[in-house]
Image (cartoon, helix red, strand yellow):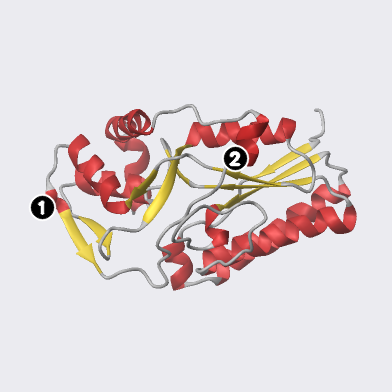
Amino acid sequence: MKEADQVVHFAAESHVDRSIEDGSVFVRTNVLGTNTLLQSALANNIKKFIHISTDEVYGSIAEGSYTETDNLNPSSPYSSSKAGSDLLAMSYYTTYGLPVCITRCTNNFGPYQYPEKLIPFFISRLMDGKKVPVYGTGMNIRDWIYVEDHCSAVDFVLHNGSSGEIYNIRGGNELTNLEITYRLLKMLDKDESSIEYVEDRKGHDFRYSLDGSKLEKMGWKPRYDFDAALEQTVKWYVENRWWWEPLKH
């Protein structure tokens, strides 16, 4: 069997709410786990190490969009652990010459996503005839990207990215949580009575936004239309309840 010569490091604890309840597992997985992979990559002369990060490491931004050179300002234990792993990954490039690239992506959605995440969580509750809990006013803004676009961007960086560089990956679909909720209600034939406004999340960032022009100038852009991809995602969850239902318990 041919030995691996490239590593794409997706593995992470990634749910903000759980990190607020207990950040320790996020530090173990995202920081110590990343260090273990970096050490192994160095020992095995890996030719390319892609470290998958998140837009959340930059923190909230009221106007404009973050570029790759902006300072990190994470808010939650989750995003702080990811920021730590980013710095650790880049240190292996600076100190040891390990060929590391970092990607920072906006909110993903699509089939097979764990049902604690907003879109599959809301779909599952609406299918069960339950209300969906919307934090605060629902006006918090996220940029959404279909998972296959994210993966194509990662593959693009794997083949075209330069060591020691960071690449933002944006979907170009900035929507409030309430806008996402209304789309799901319509697709599942529900109305506003299915919405329950709940106390806002602690330290809830208002808006994430990435400047993706660096990667787009290199030749990558997202291909999937947001609404069409969301419809396909809802359809998948409706038709594959056998897959996600056991994960809720």
Q: Which residue is mark 2?
A: 213
Between 231 and 218, the one lying in front of the other is 218
Q: Earlier in the sequence, mark 1 or mark 2?
A: 1
Q: Are marks 1 and 2 in contact (CB under 8 Å)?
A: no
Mark in the foreground, 1 or 2: 2
* The quadrant where residue 83 appears: bottom right
- In space, the residues marked 1 and 2 are separated at their CA atoms by 40 Å
Q: In the picture, residue 101 is in which quadrant?
A: top right
Indicate the secondary structure of the residue bearing disc 2. Answer: helix
Callout 1 secondary element = helix
Horizontal and vertical percent for residue 247? Answer: 38, 48
Q: Is residue 122 left or right of residue 172?
A: left
For disc 1, the marked residue is 193
Between residue 19 and residue 88, name the one nearer to us. Answer: 88
Which amino acid is tagged 2? Answer: Ser
Q: Residue at image x 52%, y 52%?
A: 65
Residue drawn at 73 percent across, 32 percent down: 160
Question: Where does the image place residue 75, in percent across and percent down from the top left?
Answer: 51, 69
The quadrant the N terminus occupies is: top right
- Please tell me which residue is depicted at 26% across the width and 52% down the height of the picture: 178
Where is residue 152, by image quadrant? top right
Q: Residue 99: x and y, percent?
A: 82, 45
Label 1 Cα crowd, 10 Å radius (few <14 / some 14-19 / many 20+): few
Q: Residues within 10 Å of mark 2 (few under 14, many from 20)?
A: some
Closer-to-camera residue (65/14): 65
